[in-house]
Image: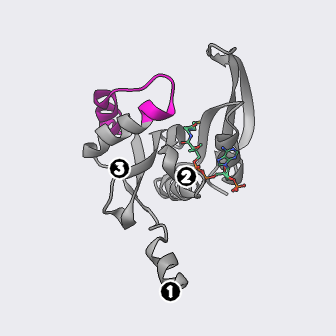
């Protein structure tokens, strides 16, 4: 009986899929709740339509449910920059961003990208752990880059080779 109940309440793994133009409003909603300055649906439509854009979403219920998270990169030749990674607050801490990032990096590598960069707030422990686990290393530091009411924070510039 307990086993049956546990199976009933077992968390259905989200599926990691290519982002579609129609995901723009879900991405804007996730961005709004994850970052201080939310970007609009129109901005996401424009970002997703850019020919350098590569984006993935995590969709609930094996891909049939709502968008729970996303990762968005911009690629130029052999380099890419990860612009955003965000998970719905209820979805955090289940390893979803780790899976999202792994699939995304594999896709970037398959597309011929050799080096990936990103910026992260030095105080963002979850994001720093996520990127360190994915093999990113610090390659630079921009002091006072993120302006916050509680005091400006440095941005760490992280990089990872995909060619190895
Ligand atoms: C950063 C973020 C994407 C991580 O997503 P997530 O699905 O919770 O990440 P995962 O569950 O895959 O965990 C990744 C690692 O971070 C750790 N972690 C997760 N939440 C944490 C927290 N609040 N504090 C410290 N470490 C944390 C996990 O333990 C895991 O490390 P491990 O592999 O050593 O166990 C998510 O917290 C988020 O959307 N934050 C708001 C937006 C943001 O800051 N994006 C990054 C901008 S650069």
Please state which of residues 47 and 59 is positioned toward the viewer in this rendering. Answer: 59
Q: Which mark is residue 19?
A: 3
Quadrant of residue 8 in the image? bottom left
Q: Which residue does the numbered mark 1 point to in the structure image? A: 1
Alpha-carbon span between mark 2 and mark 3: 15 Å
Q: Is residue 87 visible?
A: no
Q: Is mark 2 within 8 Å of ligand 1?
A: yes
Q: Earlier in the sequence, mark 2 or mark 3?
A: 3
Q: Earlier in the sequence, mark 1 or mark 3?
A: 1
Quadrant of residue 147 in the image? top right
Callout 2 secondary element: helix
Image position, residue 56 (x, y; %): 42, 51
How many neighbours does mark 1 have within 10 angstroms: few (below 14), some (14-19), or many (20 or more)? few
Callout 1 secondary element: loop
**Main secondary structure found in the magenta portion:** helix
Q: Which residue does the numbered mark 2 point to in the structure image? A: 97
Report the span colored magenta. 31-51
């Amino acid at each position: 009986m307990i086993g049956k109940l546990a199976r009933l309440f077992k968390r259905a793994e989200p599926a990691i899929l290519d982002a579609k133009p129609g995901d723009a409003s879900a991405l804007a909603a996730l961005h709004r709740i994850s970052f201080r300055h939310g970007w609009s649906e129109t901005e996401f439509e424009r970002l997703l339509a850019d020919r350098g854009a590569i984006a993935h979403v995590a969709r609930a219920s094996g891909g049939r449910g709502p968008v729970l998270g996303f990762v968005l990169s911009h690629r130029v030749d052999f380099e890419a920059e990860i612009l955003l990674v965000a998970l719905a607050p209820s979805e955090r801490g289940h390893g979803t961003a780790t899976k999202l990032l792994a699939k995304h990096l594999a896709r970037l590598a398959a597309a011929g990208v050799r080096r990936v960069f990103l910026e992260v707030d030095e105080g963002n422990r979850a994001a720093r752990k996520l990127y360190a686990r994915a093999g990113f290393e610090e390659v630079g530091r921009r002091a006072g880059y993120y302006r916050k009411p509680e005091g400006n924070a440095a941005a760490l510039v992280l990089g990872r080779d995909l060619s190895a």
